[in-house]
Image (cartoon, helix red, strand yellow):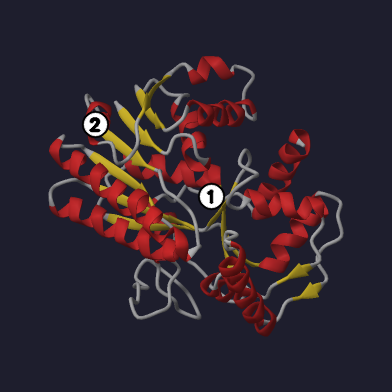
Amino acid sequence: MVLVTGGTGLVGSHLLFELSKSQLKIRALYRTKETIENVKTVFSFYTDQVDDYFNRIEWLEADLEDLPKLETAFQGVTHVYHCAALISFDPNDYYKLRKTNVTGTANIVNLSVINAIEKLCYVSSIATLGFDPEKITEETTWNPEDSQSVYAMTKHEAEMEVWRGVQEGVPSVIVNPGVILGPGFFESGSGLLFKRIHKGLKHYTSGVSGYVDVKDVVKGMIYLLNSDYKNERYIMVAENISFLELTTLISKAFKRNPPQKAVSSLKLSMAWRLDWLTHKLTGKKRKLTKNLSKTLTKKSYYSSEKLLEADVSFKFEPISAVVSEVCQIFSKTV
């Protein structure tokens, strides 16, 4: 049996759809019944037989901190896809991030050790990689002295838990996707960008980053878990493009005017300070942090050569095609 954590998120729901096409026994974790509807919504993008595919999954309500329920979830399980994570760049969410991303991953690793899991696949992020101005690979190591977001810090610590599990006998693979693009979650993550651009976006920043289709992430995860590769990490980035290129693609797909005004580093520096002051005075949740403002102007180029060498038949979907599909689905849901 295969266990999927974070089954109601963007990666998890797309992973479950692919797994439900097989004859595998699948168990997925959820936190609230409301979030399960997200999975059905995602399934509906790809099939008219939503209930048929959905009912092939055994659902179990469990929090990553609830050890008794997690122990039940691991019964009969041989392979684990650990997709669950909390995403936030707000420093005020640091302890929440630690509970989910670090403590939660430690619990999954510990139970994988206890239950002699045959293989674990952990979904991390390019945020845990180091920086090189020319090319970032799996060997570009994390520098603890660099200024890092609270999200990156907790995902890095979570990776350390997975490597600990490797030392304790659990074969594992870690995937480091770029910014994941996909339909179904337009109130969070990259989905918010599509929603914002649909309303109209005037400004852009100078940053460059790596982007990837959620279906390609899932395809790579399934391949790596079923392969002989183990105790390795793999970057998953289809293309490195600028924020202007991405927002222009999305704007044109929505038949909106692309952003025309560049935001300078100075303006971003002033903006995150104003955001901090607003938070202190009103208690409103942070929208822009110091680290996020730096990321928006940082030019990072990631290499997926290792994955492509591991699976020579693997081909990434062009980001232009991904954007087109996501925009079409978004337009049908608004």
Residue at x 60%, y 68% (from the top left corner): 281
Label annotation for residue 169: none
Residue 174 shown left or right of residue 213 in the figure? left
**Picture coordinates of residue 33 (x, y %)?**
49, 26
**Extreme residue in the bottom direction:** 266
Using a 10 Å C-alpha cutoff, classify the residue at mark 1 as few (fewer than 14 neighbours), some (14 to 19) or many (20 or more): few
Residue 120 shown left or right of residue 85 in the figure? left
Using a 10 Å C-alpha cutoff, classify the residue at mark 2 as few (fewer than 14 neighbours), some (14 to 19) or many (20 or more): some
Residue 304 shown left or right of residue 24 in the figure? right
- Dividing the picture into quarters, in which one does residue 142 lie? bottom left
Residue at x 19%, y 39% (from the top left corner): 111
Amino acid tagged 1:
Lys
Against 292, is 81 above or below?
above
Q: Secondary structure at mark 1?
A: loop
Residue at x 27%, y 45% (from the top left corner): 228
**Mark 2 vs 1: CB contact within 8 A:** no
Residue 59 shown left or right of residue 330 in the figure? left
Q: Nearer the viewer, mark 2 or mark 1?
A: 2
**Picture coordinates of residue 104 (x, y %)?**
30, 46
Residue beneath disc 1: 315
Quadrant including the N terminus: top left
Against 250, is 15 above or below?
above
**Picture coordinates of residue 208 (x, y %)?**
61, 71
Residue at x 64%, y 19% (from the top left corner): 48
Q: Secondary structure at mark 2?
A: loop
**Picture coordinates of residue 216 (x, y %)?**
52, 46
Q: Mark 2 to mark 1: distance in Å?
A: 28 Å
Nearest the viewer among 136 and 149 is 149
Residue beneath disc 2: 78
**Extreme residue in the front direction:** 281
Quadrant including the C terminus: top right
